[in-house]
Every structure is written in structure tokens, then in C-alpha cells.
Image (cartoon, rainbow, N blue to C red):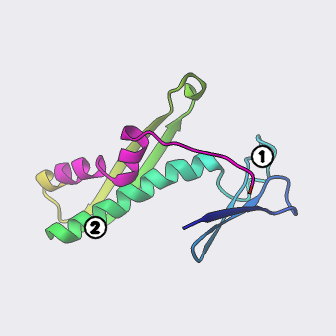
Amino acid sequence: MSIIVRRDTAYPMRHTVLVRDHELLVDGTIEEGGDDAGPNPHDLYDAALGACKAITLVWYAKRKGIALEEVEVIIDRDASGERQGVYKLDTALRLGGDLTDAQREELLAVAGKCPVHKLMTRVTTEITTRLA
């Protein structure tokens, strides 16, 4: 599967991202020289973590018969040390439903094991860039 990113020349920095049959807009913030017409790449990176945690929790709860009804993942970024090699993401979970304290703790542990969390923290990613 390929993800395609194409520039939208009607805007200074906006691009269209094509993922399968889905289209997303990405842009730089006003401070970066864009029009803020969509999330920037860092936003997408952070959102991937939140989305993975949410989807993983719903999948797990259904599989285990846990009455999880609502999931909200709040992500706060601290990129102040990024140039020194530290990028911090603080994630907070709001879970709704008829859940016991033990189930909440179980779901918290599961959220820490979502595939994107593992990818971001345990895997070396190798990237090649070439001219097509």
C-alpha cells in the first residue's frame, strides 16, 4: 500500500494525503508559513498514537466483554527537547461505561501496548528517500 502526498498549489504549504480511498488535508500552521488549513505532520504523528490507543481499547473491550462505551484520548505534546532527541507525548484516557476500577486499570495497561505506541517506542524505523 502506498500513501500519496500531493501539493495543493492554491495554498502556500497545503498538501492532500491519499490513503486508500481516504483524503486528508495537511498544512503548516500560520507560524510555519501555512494557512492552518489542516493538521501539520507533527499533529498527524501524535494523532496516530491517540487513534491507535482508542481503536485498540474498543477492540480489546469487545473481545473481553468489557462494557466500554466511550473513549477519549487526549494528547499533549512537549516538543521543546525534540532537537536534543526527546519528543514527549502525554496521553490521558477518559473511559465511559459501567467499568470497575480493575477494568479501568486493565484498559490503561492495554492502551500502553497499542501497535503505534510500540512502533514509536520499541522499533527502529529505517527510512529511505529517493527520487521516483
Q: Is residue 67 visible?
A: no
Q: State which tag comes first along the sequence, 1 or 2.
A: 1
Q: Please say if 85 is above or below 70.
A: above
Residue 84, image x and y in percent?
Answer: 56, 22
- The kind of residue on which mark 1 rests is Ile
Q: Nearer the viewer, residue 96 or 112?
A: 112
Q: Is residue 32 magenta?
A: no
Most distant residue in the right direction: 10
Of tags 1 and 2, the one toward the viewer is 2
The residue lying at 80 percent from left, 53 percent from top is 13
Residue 47, image x and y in percent?
Answer: 50, 53
Q: Image check: 111 left or right of 79?
A: left
- The kind of residue on which mark 2 rests is Trp
Q: Image check: 132 left or right of 43?
A: right
Quarter occupied by the C terminus: bottom right
Q: Nearer the viewer, residue 42 or 78?
A: 42
Quarter occupied by the N terminus: bottom right
Most distant residue in the top direction: 84
Q: Residues within 10 Å of mark 2 (few under 14, many from 20)?
A: few
Element at badge 1?
loop
Q: Is residue 96 visible?
A: yes
Q: Image check: 63 left or right of 37?
A: left
Magenta residues, as a range? Answer: 104-131
Residue 110, image x and y in percent?
Answer: 24, 52
Q: Residues within 10 Å of mark 1 (few under 14, many from 20)?
A: few
What residue is pinned by disc 2? 59
Question: Residue 30's mark?
Answer: 1
Q: Quadrant of residue 89?
A: top left
Distance in Å between CA atoms under marks 1 and 2: 37 Å
Q: Is residue 123 magenta?
A: yes
